Each structure stands twice: as C-alpha cells, then as structure tokens.
C-alpha cells in the first residue's frame, strides 16, 4: 500500500504518553490533492496522529514519510525542503489566532519566519491570500476579535496557505462553527483543493462532515484504525461493527429516516459500552 | 448556546491607565515627580548641600520655600534631588527584578521540565530570605552605595516577576496560536519573544508599578536607618534628619513623608487602573432599572399548555443601554410534548430557555412579556417564584455535564441533598431514590457511581447522573440545553434514547435547545426555529422537514450535510503546484 505516488505515509506509527499507548500501529497514506478523512470519537487518537504529522507531538516508533523524507519526531522549525510544506488549520478559530496581532501580522509571519519573503513582499502576498479565502482586502489591518468565527477560520486557512502547502492537517476545522458557516467553510476547503492541488488530512468527529469532503476515510477507535477505505464504501457500506454503530448513531435531519436508523441501531444490539 | 464571553481586549497598558480618571491623575503625578527629579539641577533654588547656619530648622519663608532642615539646608532643593535618587534606586531594583524574573519565567514556563524545577527552587529560596536582613548584611559587606543595595533588593524581588510570568506563560503555552506558530516554522526564541511576551506584557507592567512602590518604601527605610551615602540627598535621609529634630521642627517630617506617600500611592493606583482596564474591559453601566412589565395572556389560558410565552423580551445591559437578545418570543409547549428550540449561535434559544428557568446571566432581565407556567405568571415577579418551581416542577439538564457537578463532593451527596431539601425526603429515602434513579438512567453499577467523585466517571455517565437528578422531582417540564453537544456521537444516541424513554415514562414535557437538526428529527414533536432573538417558524417536526415555510429554515436545512455526494479522487493530475 506504500505506493510511491503517496504524498504522506504513516508506517506502523506507535505513540506512547508515558506508559500509556495512545496510538497503535497506525498505517495511513495521503495522495497528492487528496482528502483523507480521519473520523473517531474523543480519545480515539485522531488529533494525536495529526500532531505527529505536524511535528508538534511525539512519535514513539514507526515512520512518517513525506515526499520521501522521514519526518517523524522532527519539529517544524527543523524541517527543510518539501517537508516545510505541511501546514495546519485547528479547531478553535478563537484561540488559534493571537489576539494581539493584526491579520496582516498573522499572515506575513510564516513567510518571514521561513525566509521565503521580505516583510514588504509578504505584505504584498496578504491581499492575494485574503482574496483566496474570500475575505475583503481591508481585513488586513484588523484584529481577530473583529471577526466572526467563520471569518476567523478563513484567516487561519489563509495563514496555512501562505507557505504554498502540499498538505494541510485540518483538526476539526468546522466543529466550532454554526451550521450555515460550516457549509460555506467546507465549500472553501474544496474549492482551494481544486485550485491548488493541496492535500488534506481532515480530522473530525462528524462522519457527515468527513463524508462531504473526503476521498478516502479512516475510522479510528482507541488508538487504532479499524477501517480505512474509499469514502463511499466506509460511509455507506461500513464493514467494521464500530463504523456501523458510528454511522447509525449520528441522527439525520429527517424524522422518518431517523426513526428507522434508531431502530436499526437498537437492532445492532451491540453491547453498549458504558458511556 | 450563545457566547457572551467578552474577548480580552488587548489594549496598550498605558492607554488603559489613562482611560480611568484615577489612573490619569496618578500618571500625571508620577510624571511631575519624575520631571522634577530629572530637572532638579535646574529647578532647585540652592545646592542641596549648601548650609545656611541661620536657617537651621527654619519655617518656610521667601528664600527657603519649604523651610530648612536640621543642618540649615534647603528642604525644597533636597526634596527635588531626593526625587532623582529615589527614582534611580527604584529603577535599578525594578529593572534587575524584571530582567531576571521575566526572562527566567518565560523560559521556565515555555520549556517546563527540569529548567522549570530548578528555577522554581531558586525562586522559592530567594523568597524565603528575609529581605531587610540580607540588605543590611550586604550593606556591611559592600559599603555605602544605596544603588548597590537596590540592585540586591531587585534580585530579592525577582521571584515575584518569575512566578507571575511563569504562570502566564503556562496558561498561553497550550493556546492553539502557539501551535500554529510552531507549524509555521517559527523557532522557540521567536515564539517566546513574539507571541508569549505579548501575552505577559500587561500583567508585567502592573507588577512593575507595584514593585517600584515597594522599592521606594524600602529604599527610604534603608536611608532612614542611616544606610546610604550621607552626602547624597534622599527622601529617607530627609526623614531621618527630620526625626532627629522632631521636637524642634516637626514640619520637616511632612515634606519627605508626603513625597513618599504620594509617589507610592500613585504607583499603586496606576497599577490598579491598568489592571481594571485589562480585566474588566467595559463594565456595563446600568441605567435606571427597568421594571419588567408583564402582559398577562388575555383571558384564554390553554388548558393543554404547560408553558406559554407571549412577546417575551430578554435584554442585557451594554454601553448604549439595553441590548435585546430575545425580541418578542411567543410559543406554547403542550403537556407531554417534546418541544425543540433550534437555531444558530446568537439566535437567543438558550436565553429563552434560561428566562423560563429564571437563570439569566448577571445583568440579564426580562424586559417585557409573559411566561405562564401551568397558569402561574413568572415574568415580572421576583426570584422566589422561580425558586418555588425550579427543581420541583421545572428541571434542567445542562450542556456541560462535568462543569455542573461539584468536583469536591461525591455524586451521591449531590443527588440526595436537593432531594432532602426540596422534596423533604429523609436521608435514607433520598439514598434509596437516588440509587433507583441511577439504575433507571442506565448506569450499570449505581452503588459505585453513588460513591464516586465526578472525576471518576465519564462525560456520558455524568450526563446520566444529571438527568437522574433532573427527573428526581418528577417534573412537569424538563429543559435540556444542548444536552448532547459535548458528548460523543454514540453516547449522544444513548442519552437521547434515555430522554425519550423517561419522557414516555414520566409524561413530562421537554424543551430541547439544540443547533442540531438531527437531534430535532430524532426527538421533537414540535419545533421552533429561532434567528436573532425571534422565532421565524413553528411547526410540527415532520412538517418542518418536509414543508419548511420560512426561507431561513430552508437555508439551514440546505446546509445539513446528510448524504452529500461523495467526491471522486481524480489522481495527481489536479495537483500541479
């Protein structure tokens, strides 16, 4: 499965926090321009794998290969070449932007830090980035607190785009957003992927969101990937009992179908783990 | 749920100080004292060391405006030069303390681990030293320079800065924007200097102001004890001289005393006003209290209704006066019905529910309208009416189960206490009832949960405990505010099942506040869609999903991601950058 055209390969990744093993033998691949959805409940380890790929979390054993380089355990500021083209969009658009910096400062910082542009060049780029995420160009002088949650998330996306990434790790990027905002931000993610060919490792607890954006989906439970395959297969014809439960547990916005699903979930009669 | 948390306003500390009249006055006084000290050579009418023998302990006159001291020197000139020395001394100790403390605090807070442990030991050791004794010892060893003593005092004060900075850094270190900066490729030093220093700036400014005040007092104290260069005019030295002549010229105590008190008080007031501005932001100015006007429902009381809201207006005070968050909501919840209040953040759905519970956040008021619960009018009354119903006939299940359990009490106590107080059960009866309910809400080992502390159970179990507590009074109405939002999806399904079963068993009405149309479809008989404080549509659940009448409802339903078409991966071709 380690195809040479894979952009990212997680190969038998194990992660321990102290004596506790939080990630067991995780194998995952992302192809260029592809979205791989990573879905799971709290404590499943989905955020941990994302942080390991970003280089801001530990890796105990196994390889994380990006464009041929093993980047496991290498912190972002020590990464070089193509490996610098992994960026992130986090869940909470409120705490992911420094409240005392203007949007322009936020967007120019990665460019200047990586030595990819002078301050003046970076400022030129800000306008382009803002238009890519459909924010007005006068947004650059303003502070994060002046924006709504959805707009802040657009700023965070623009920051991730500044370094022309090949892979963006998106950790629950729409979970904190309202329904209508969530739909628009997902559309933006898809449009940007189509324009730039960036790949996403898209982490979410929400199977519906993952289904809407992913090409392939991996389902995590208790530190392991229990199912990984084409989006259609995993989200419509799940093989693993846990995925089936996950699928049926999320209520759908249709009273008639929801009643059927509820009955189906009860019929699954999985010994309910004491919640 | 609505976010009323006000963002911390990051404004420049100095501007913050000026925004407050007290802070402004303090700043002006400090600036004047500082200027006087700096310009002492130009302003002082005499050389501070010049002795005029006939002016010994003289009263103020045309030559010596503030009189003469015990040696016949000009009090005014000595006061001005003293200001200069006082400020230099204070500056030395503050700069030394802040440089050491802030730097060590930044690194200890950011890196943690052994560096943190060692620096914390050093800081604790320094704090344990008795400052004055150390200073006296150093003075003996190092000689008469008060500035050297102040530098040593600065080292002794550095743990204050260290602890402050360290705790601030630790609180921002796990903020996502620090992670984002790391992912952007910023090195640690750059992150510390750029992101973290900004966050600690304001509290450090406050600390500087307070520490400067302390140093001035300590410096004056040392000089008063006679430590320091007798040839240099200082406020403490003046105080000592005045004390020696207290019975002949008591007026001389006033000048240095006033100078020290006013300067130190200004520093403390400045610190307070900066802190107030940083913390409080705007404190809502309460205009004249507005009497809630209840407009009782005219005549027709629907006997089928357990709850009727008519033109309910809920408002919170802000800078301009009152801001309405619920703008005239009318709805009817029938007996035994599950009623959904659905909307996005800021729609007022939670505020509507909290108004019925009488649990509006601080400052919130029911400005007008009627809340009629089983024929009892609640709006316009005082808290006692709500108290009489809450936990007896109206129950509540919150969004965050964990934060609604007190971590220091066992779950059993938290369940039985209200039963004893509200339902008048005996201790044994309450325990039996609690165990029965814990079993009823699907907890497998009620005895174990009864004896457990909240941190020993999961979020899903905590929500079951709260539901058990809510139904313990056999309520007529249960208000559940996003009861499953904080839970995992499989747990959510179980908790919704539980609520549905309990509703059927107890025959109560439920109001579910939610943003999730799936939850609505799963649970509700009737739904009200809210937007910006108003209800745009009320309908039976099936009708709402099949024939939404309002365009806002249609827009929301369009955003629901149920079974969207799956994307096809078209290979590397589209990747071309």
Image (cartoon, coloured by chain):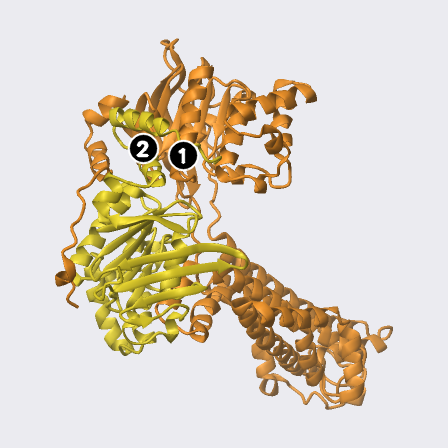
Q: Is residue A56 above or below residue A184?
A: below
Residue at 37 percent across and 18 percent down: it is: B337
Please count the marks in the image: 2
Letter of the chain shown orange in the rendering: B
**Disc 1, SS:** helix
| Viewer-closest of B48 and A47 | A47
Find residue B65 and report its horizontal and vertical position in percent: 69, 78
| Residue A251 numbered tag | 2
Residue A248 drawn at (x, y percent): 32, 34
Which quadrant of the structure image shows residue B517?
top left
* Foreground pick, B460 / B258: B460
Q: Position of residue B329 (x, y in %)?
A: 34, 26
> For this view, does B334 lie left or right of residue B63?
left
Observer able to see residue B387: no
Looking at the image, can residue B570 be seen? yes
Marks 1 and 2: CB-CB under 8 Å?
Answer: yes
Residue located beneath label 1 in the image: B492
Give the quadrant of residue A101. bottom left
Front one among B373 and A204: A204
Per the rendering, the mark at residue A70 is none
Task: Please name the residue shown 27% across and 79% down the image.
Answer: A118
- Chain the render paints yellow: A
Q: Residue at the spot x=37%, y=9% of the render?
A: B299
Which quarter shows the C terminus of chain B?
bottom left
| Helix, strand or loop at mark 2 | loop
Apparent side of residue B52 relative to residue A105 in the rendered image (left or right): right
| Quadrant position of the N terminus of chain B in the picture | top left
Q: Chain of mark 2?
A: A
Relative placement, left or right, of B253 versus B475 is: right
């Amino acid at each position: 499965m380690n195809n040479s055209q894979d952009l990212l390969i997680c190969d038998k990744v194990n992660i321990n926090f102290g004596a506790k093993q939080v990630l067991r033998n995780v194998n995952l691949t992302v192809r260029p321009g592809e979205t791989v959805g990573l879905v799971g409940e709290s404590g499943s380890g989905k955020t941990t794998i994302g942080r390991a790929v970003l280089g801001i979390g530990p890796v105990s054993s196994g390889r994380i290969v990006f464009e041929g380089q093993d980047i496991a355990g290498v912190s972002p500021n020590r990464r070089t070449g193509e490996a610098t083209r992994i960026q992130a969009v986090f869940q909470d658009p409120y705490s992911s932007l420094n409240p005392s910096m203007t949007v322009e400062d936020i967007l120019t910082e990665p460019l200047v830090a990586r030595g990819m542009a002078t301050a003046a060049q970076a400022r030129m780029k800000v306008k382009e980035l803002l238009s890519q995420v459909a924010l007005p160009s006068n947004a650059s002088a303003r502070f994060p607190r002046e924006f709504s949650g959805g707009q802040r998330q657009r700023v965070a996306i623009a920051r991730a785009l500044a370094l022309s990434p090949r892979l963006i790790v998106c950790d629950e990027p729409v979970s904190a957003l309202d329904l209508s905002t969530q739909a628009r931000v997902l559309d933006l993610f898809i449009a940007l992927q189509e324009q730039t060919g960036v790949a996403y490792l898209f982490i979410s607890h929400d199977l519906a969101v993952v289904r809407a954006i992913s090409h392939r989906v991996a389902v995590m439970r208790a530190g392991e990937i229990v199912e990984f395959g084409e989006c259609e297969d995993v989200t419509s014809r799940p093989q693993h009992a846990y995925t089936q439960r996950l699928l049926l547990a999320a209520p759908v916005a249709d009273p008639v179908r929801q009643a059927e699903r509820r009955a189906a979930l009860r019929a699954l009669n999985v010994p309910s783990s004491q919640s | 749920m609505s976010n009323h948390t006000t963002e911390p306003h990051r404004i420049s500390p100095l501007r913050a100080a000026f925004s407050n009249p007290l802070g402004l006055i303090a700043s002006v006084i400090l600036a004047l004292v500082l200027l006087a000290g700096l310009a002492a050579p130009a302003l002082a009418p005499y050389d501070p060391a010049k002795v005029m023998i006939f002016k010994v302990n003289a009263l103020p006159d045309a030559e010596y405006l503030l009189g003469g001291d015990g040696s016949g020197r000009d009090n005014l000139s000595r006061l001005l030069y003293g200001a200069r020395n006082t400020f230099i001394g204070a500056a030395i100790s503050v700069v030394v303390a802040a440089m050491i403390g802030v730097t060590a605090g930044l690194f200890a807070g950011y890196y943690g681990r052994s560096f943190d442990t060692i620096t914390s030991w050093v800081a604790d050791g320094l704090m344990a030293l008795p400052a004055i004794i150390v200073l006296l010892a150093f003075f003996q060893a190092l000689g008469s320079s008060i500035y050297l003593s102040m530098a040593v005092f600065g080292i002794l004060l550095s743990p204050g800065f260290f602890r402050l900075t360290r705790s601030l850094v630790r609180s921002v270190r796990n903020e996502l924007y620090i992670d984002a900066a790391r992912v952007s490729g910023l090195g640690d030093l750059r992150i510390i200097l750029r992101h973290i220093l900004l966050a600690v700036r304001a509290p450090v400014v406050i600390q500087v102001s307070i520490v400067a005040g302390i140093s001035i007092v300590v410096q004056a104290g040392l000089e008063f004890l006679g430590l320091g260069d007798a040839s240099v005019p200082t406020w403490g030295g003046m105080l000592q001289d005045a004390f020696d002549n207290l019975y002949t010229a008591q007026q001389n105590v006033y000048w240095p005393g006033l100078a020290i008190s006013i300067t130190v008080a200004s520093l403390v007031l400045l610190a307070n006003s900066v802190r107030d501005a940083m913390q409080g932001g705007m404190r809502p100015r309460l205009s004249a209290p507005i009497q809630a006007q209840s407009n009782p429902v005219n005549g027709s009381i629907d006997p089928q209704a357990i709850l009727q809201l008519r033109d309910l207006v809920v408002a919170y005070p802000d800078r301009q006066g009152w801001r309405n968050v619920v703008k005239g909501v009318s709805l009817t919840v029938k007996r035994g019905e599950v009623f959904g209040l659905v909307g996005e953040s800021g729609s007022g759905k939670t505020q509507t529910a909290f108004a019925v519970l009488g649990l509006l956040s601080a400052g919130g008021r029911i400005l007008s309208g009627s809340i009629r619960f089983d024929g009892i009018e609640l709006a316009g009354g005082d808290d006692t009416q709500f108290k009489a119903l809450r936990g007896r006939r109206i129950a509540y299940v919150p969004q965050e189960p964990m934060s609604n359990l007190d971590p220091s009490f066992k779950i059993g106590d938290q369940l039985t206490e209200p039963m004893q107080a509200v339902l008048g059960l005996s201790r044994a009866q309450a325990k039996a009832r609690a165990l029965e309910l814990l079993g009823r809400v699907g907890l497998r080992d009620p005895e174990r949960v009864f004896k457990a502390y909240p941190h020993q159970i999961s979020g899903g179990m905590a929500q079951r405990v709260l539901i058990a507590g809510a139904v313990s009074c056999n309520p007529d109405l249960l208000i559940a505010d996003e009861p499953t939002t904080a839970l995992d999806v499989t747990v959510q399904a179980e908790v919704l099942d539980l609520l549905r079963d309990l509703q059927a068993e107890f025959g109560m009405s439920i109001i579910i506040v939610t943003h999730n149309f799936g939850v609505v479809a799963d649970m509700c008989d009737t739904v009200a869609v809210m937007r910006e404080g108003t209800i745009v549509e009320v309908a039976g659940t099936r009708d709402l999903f099949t024939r939404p009448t309002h365009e806002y409802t249609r827009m929301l339903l369009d955003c629901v991601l149920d079974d969207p078409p799956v994307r096809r991966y078209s290979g590397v071709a589209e990747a071309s950058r």
